Image (tube, coloured by chain):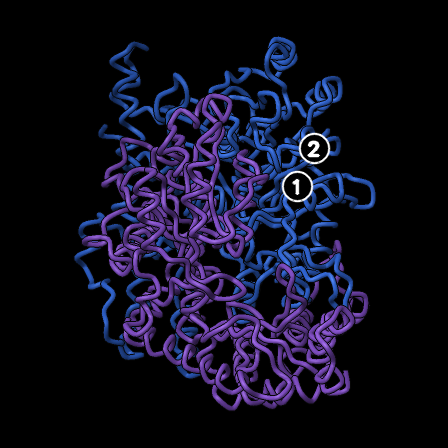
Chain colours: A purple, B blue
Amino acid sequence: MSFLQDIVDILLQYVVKSFDRTTKVIDFHYPNELLQEYNWELADQPQTLEEILLNCRTTLKYAIKTGHPRYFNQLSTGLDMVGLAADWLTSAANTNMFTYEIAPVFVLLEYVTLRKMREMVGWPGGCGDGIFSPGGAISNMYAMLIARFKMFPEVKEKGMAAIPRLVAFTSEHSHFSVKKGAAALGIGTDIKMPNTHSDLAKCLSAFLQGFVPFLVSATAGTTVYGAFDPLIAIADICKKYKIWMHVDGAWGGGLLMSRKHKWKLNGVERANSVTWNPHKMMGVPLQCSALLVREEGLMQSCNQMHASYLFQQDKHYDLSYDTGDKALQCGRHVDVFKLWLMWRAKGTTGFEAQIDKCLELAEYLYNKIKNREGYEMVFDGKPQHTNVCFWYIPPSLRSMEDNEERMSRLMKVAPVIKARMMEYGTTMVSYQPLGDKVNFFRMVISNPAATHQDIDFLIDEIERLGQDL
Amino acid sequence: MSFLQDIVDILLQYVVKSFDRTTKVIDFHYPNELLQEYNWELADQPQTLEEILLNCRTTLKYAIKTGHPRYFNQLSTGLDMVGLAADWLTSAANTNMFTYEIAPVFVLLEYVTLRKMREMVGWPGGCGDGIFSPGGAISNMYAMLIARFKMFPEVKEKGMAAIPRLVAFTSEHSHFSVKKGAAALGIGTDIKMPNTHSDLAKCLSAFLQGFVPFLVSATAGTTVYGAFDPLIAIADICKKYKIWMHVDGAWGGGLLMSRKHKWKLNGVERANSVTWNPHKMMGVPLQCSALLVREEGLMQSCNQMHASYLFQQDKHYDLSYDTGDKALQCGRHVDVFKLWLMWRAKGTTGFEAQIDKCLELAEYLYNKIKNREGYEMVFDGKPQHTNVCFWYIPPSLRSMEDNEERMSRLMKVAPVIKARMMEYGTTMVSYQPLGDKVNFFRMVISNPAATHQDIDFLIDEIERLGQDL
């Protein structure tokens, strides 16, 4: 117990430092350096508890401070104290979600929480089904799996050979997990995606020859631009063609908590399934991803295998609480408790305030740079989510013509600035190319600890690190 | 911070009580009672931190003490202090495994730990590849996915329609996740399994008409009996027919740590892939499951989608450490640190001692009951793993003929005893029917805190609770 308290003391110090702007976000080392910096190898003989504590300190020394107010690198940032406490409790309870028998409270909390999330999606009385899955990619794969089963239940036993060739639709800005899921499920990825959703209806009728369209995966909050697909229009098309409508709201789902911003998801209530990752915009510790399904019972029929060693039918309690056979996983980590406890601590209004604040900060950034010298925005208009995508144009490129040479020089700007940021350890922000657009910064804000001053710092830092390029 | 310390105090008390034999394993309530016992609902308004602490206390009051020395209900039991500390550190670090950029230390530790596990499997120099996945079911699904891709790489783009009908082989005692995986991957589950592995070769030649056998999933430690498939014989067959050999060692893999017991996995070094769940026999907190793959690079080609927002090709460090594109998941929880830290604290020899002890306890139980009045063993001979499967025959059935009435009465014995155990909260052990065998107890031991006295207690408790049946 004194060992656990020693670890806690180390962790509390780390947590305090995570929020301290004078601390580095990262103490960067190249992989081969870091491998040599310390002896990480596993051996036959045990180490002492003192050495174990040193291992922990060393690990934290080189870890990224993902709770730092200047860490903007991913969609999941921040470190919520109640969420952290809940995760610690989850570890101490060390159980598995497959049956009520071994996770009574957590199974009930999953039930309560998923129902509440479905209510927020707009399904009457929170009706439907769902599960917490290990991340948005798996949630999206579940949606495809269930949609396929709904249309062709024989696929479960007979495989793809027994059913027509299927095709799923999604936009080119959708998350790559839709393709990963299609590959895994044996559907294949070799399908041209409609470039805009207005092409969707056209594509659908064209594809009717030889292929059966079975799912449209619309995106609520794309990964790079934070854009929202027109869900109402897509719902109309899906209704007309009787196709499963999935909404990947892994990133944008959090906006359902905000009275000001939830209109961006109008139409989500007409979806058959929704992915929503509270570990992104709601700041719940990793991982916490929900798949919500409108039709009750479908997940169960799709995935159940009736393992008699887990789902005995002669138990003494209500078996509808043995939810494990809905899942592809057998053992399933308890991901619900951190969301549930944070929701109790903040209330819906607390999540709303936190999300509104992040969107306000994104708008502040957008307004700050849209006309600023040395900046070009990647897409027109105000960001719909907290994604602000922009090029920083170093002075040497500002008066250049827009030709290939400029593009090839601009392409190198963001990676160099990013590398310098990491070496200084002052801040982190993501960049990427997209289609014909060369590397640009994608700023996202999901950490409620960030302030206007941190946005100002980011811009100053980009200029400091990039002006000689 | 004082809030976090308050939570820690609650958790430390809980941990201490988990090991106290005078504490109940479970304070059982039926689902509808538990729903009414407390207000679990989510509301608009926040609760105070005092209320949050109360939520935590209430949650723990009704949680199962999975670390309790008399909790034998699942393959994952026990609560290791170093593992718990490591999980707490993981929560505080709150990052994601997809890139070195945001998880430098954890990516390196995954590399070190997987290589060590592959060494223990027996692949030269720990060569190969692997990943920590969210549980054994997903690890097994990965194996099928990769095996299919290895034989027919075009399946990724073109889907199952472009390749022959596939068939996987596994024994009837294999884990149900093999079927779940086959259903998800579009292969279908409607495949007769060879009842014994000696039938495998026969089945294989028979199936060659119209189907392409692509994978044999052998089991090292079946879920119910703890049996080990004859891996060398299976390896010979797989070699002959050029089929991917997968070993599901989710449960039995831990025995590789034991010089005394690892012979049971002889032949595993000839597998193409191995599932091994340290969260089972090695007592690592949930979840920690590894898939090991012999051929390097295959996971990457099979699953990669080159998302340019994560896996930028112009980063400033060695990109081979950006391992996320190997996975089906995008975000991936850090599951490695608890295993790594426990391994450092125990050494391989510490895991060995812990595993040997659990197997010795199982043998003690077997010897105690094999000739005891009122017990019948479900399978002949000494258990190969810690699974001891037996019927308790209450006095009223002992002199009955072995007819249908006896069977139908015996079927009800284990469920009633189990229900009583849970209501008294004194111990928990699993039961199930299997094939034509009516409900029997499946005792498993993976908690190093258990002792001979706890085994004695279990037997006394079964007799106390079952003698009137």
Q: Residue at x 44, y 32 (%)?
A: A208
Residue nearer the viewer, B248 or A284: A284
Q: Residue B375: where, in percent of width, then height?
A: 39, 24
Residue nearer the viewer, A458 or B179: A458
Left or right of B11: which side holds A46?
A: right
Crowding at dot 2, Cα within 10 Å, few <14 / some 14-19 / many 20+, comes out as some
For the residues labelled 2 and 1, the Cα–Cα distance comes to 8 Å
Residue nearer the viewer, A220 or B235: A220
Crowding at dot 1, Cα within 10 Å, few <14 / some 14-19 / many 20+, comes out as many
Q: Is residue A148 visible?
A: yes
How many marks can you see?
Answer: 2
Residue position marked by numbered label 2 in the rendering: B150
Q: Residue at x 56, y 60 (%)?
A: B83
Q: Which chain is indicated by disc 2?
A: B
Quarter of the image with the C terminus of chain B in it:
top left
Q: Is residue B342 visible?
A: no
Residue nearer the viewer, B445 or A174: A174
Quarter of the image with the N terminus of chain B in it:
bottom left
Picture quadrant of residue A213: top left
Q: Secondary structure at mark 1?
A: helix
Looking at numbered disc 2 in the image, what kind of residue is underneath it? Lys
| Circle on res. B302 | 1
Q: Residue at x 74, y 71 (%)?
A: A403
Looking at numbered disc 1 in the image, what kind of residue is underneath it? Cys
Q: Which chain is indicated by disc 1?
A: B
Q: Secondary structure at mark 2?
A: helix
Asked if disc 2 and disc 1 are in contact, CB closer than 8 Å, the reply is yes
Above-or-below relation of B153 to A53? above
Q: Residue A394: where, in percent of width, then height?
A: 71, 84
Q: Residue B276: where, in percent of width, then height?
A: 61, 42
